[in-house]
Amino acid sequence: MAPNVIDDRDSSVEFTGGRWDQSWGVKEEYNSTTSLGTEKGMSVTLHFTGKHPNLGDSNIMCINLKSK
């Protein structure tokens, strides 16, 4: 089964805790989009429902998360 890929602009992704800078046209990023949070306490939540038939609860992998 191929993995599902969700872009940071998808409605299932919720950004909270401050002002997020969101850019378009960053060709190195998936769908050329990027989101940057620079304040302490900011968070991202991915809302989803589902189970993998063989693994039980789904596994989530985030790529390019950076902290300063």
Image (tube, rainbow, N blue to C red):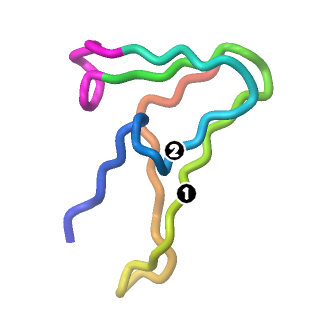
Q: Is residue 16 left or right of residue 60?
A: right
Say which amino acid is labelled 2: Val
The residue identified by callout 2 is 13
The residue located at (25%, 18%) in the rendering is 28
Q: Is residue 54 above or below residue 48?
A: below
The structure residue drawn at horizontal position 46% and vertical position 46%, both measured from the top left corner, is: 11
Residue 44 x %, y %: 61, 39
Image location (x, y in percent) of residue 26: 28, 14
Tag 1 and tag 2, C-beta contact below 8 Å: yes
Q: Which residue is mark 1?
A: 47
Tally of marks: 2
Q: Dot 2: what SS?
A: strand
The structure residue drawn at horizontal position 60% and vertical position 19%, both measured from the top left corner, is 20
Residue 38, image x, y percentages: 66, 14
Quarter placement of the C terminus: top right
Within 10 Å of the Cα at label 1, are there few (<14), some (14-19), or many (20+) other Cα atoms? few
